[in-house]
Image: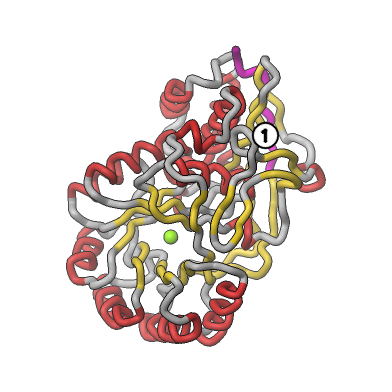
Amino acid sequence: MGIQQIEVYPVTLAYREPFRIAPGASTESHNVVAKIVTDYGVYGWGEASPSERVTGETPETVIKVLDKIVPKLIGMCPLRIEQTVELMDNLVAENPSAKAAIDIALHDIFGKTVRKELFRVLGGYRTDVLTDITLGIKSPKEMARDAVKAVKRGFKALKVKVGVNPEEDVERIRLIREAVGEKIHIRIDANQGWTPKQAIQALNKMEKYNIQFAEQPVPAEDLKGLIEVKRNSPIPVMADESVHSPGDALRLVEAEAIDLINIKLMKSGGIHKAEKIAAIAEAAGIPCMIGCMGESEIGIAAGAHLAAAIKNIQYADLDSDLLLKEKLAKKGGTKVKNSMRIFPKSHGLGIKELDNSKLGKPLKVYK
Ligand SMILES: [Mg+2]
């Protein structure tokens, strides 16, 4: 049983509208899809959605890194995932999105080989996953209107992007809470946009609007600042950009710097290491969320299966496929109904058919 062929496809998918967060706006997501074909008729899909801002990766670096890694994988057993992860780390440091594309495709193969939906073989804790939808930065009034639209579409949790101007950020939250009422969960994400002092002031002012948690209030490398914010915030603090790897999770747990961790497959290098982060966090009593970058239905399915599988992944922000105008999956993938990610009854990730007009021809085929 071995890996026979690996195909690499660069893919560009447009957002429905420019998506703005504290560090800047995006109009397109530039991803790299990997297809791993085995010699026993099973194949798997994986995806990298690199973020230069978060991991320093671009589609070009992903393709370069895959060119180093992929030839070494031909002939390997696709079920030896721990061994493959070790090999990838020995060949190239960092570059977690590129490695995630391989890791996700191997997990798809794993589910298909044992003929089960992936979440069932990774732990099977839940059968569906509540996801939020993200509101990109606009004026406070426009964001309140977007919030109402999202609630009308059935979403029960909103992730509100802030981190531009603390006073205006408080106004965003005030208007959104007023517009959606008390029953909707509101979580916020400053994407490193505040200083510790600004964060502490803003979070104390936001307390009365019942915020579930605040993601990455201060710059990723400012550990002292993060600790200061956690100690002085009435709202639980979640690390996103500060935690990529299991090692990062351990360091922040030991420093008592955070209340929660946002795991993303594009930061961890895929599902295998994401499981390790969730385990470290669980031992420390720290719940996790699973988030996303700009993944299509492939990467989102991977995150959703993991979130359903693992008890300590208690929250999900799995919405990038909904923010993208262009769909890569023609059939299959997870769907959203009343804020819940639901799984098709098919093996592995459940991606049945991709849109060939979006996928195009492979840039590289390794065999
Ligand atoms: Mg975030």
Q: At which x and y percent is residue 110?
A: 55, 26
238 displayed left or right of 148: left
Q: What residue do we see at 57% from left, 82% from top?
A: 145
Q: On the picture, is 350 further left or further right than 161?
A: right
Q: Is residue 119 above or below residue 213?
A: above
Residue that badge 1 annotates: 8
Does the Cβ of the disc 1 residue fall within 8 Å of ligand 1? no
| Picture colour scheme | secondary structure
State whether residue 1 is above or below residue 236: above
Q: Residue at x 59, y 33 (%)?
A: 348
Q: Which residues are magenta?
A: 1-10
| Residue 263 falls left or right of residue 119 | left
User: Can I make out residue 105 in this image?
Assistant: no
From what the image shows, is residue 320 above or below residue 73? below
Residue 337 appears anywhere in the view: yes
**Residue visible at 54% across and 42% down in the picture:** 302
Q: For the residue carrying disc 1, how many other residues have a C-alpha within 10 Å: few (<14), some (14-19), or many (20+)?
A: many
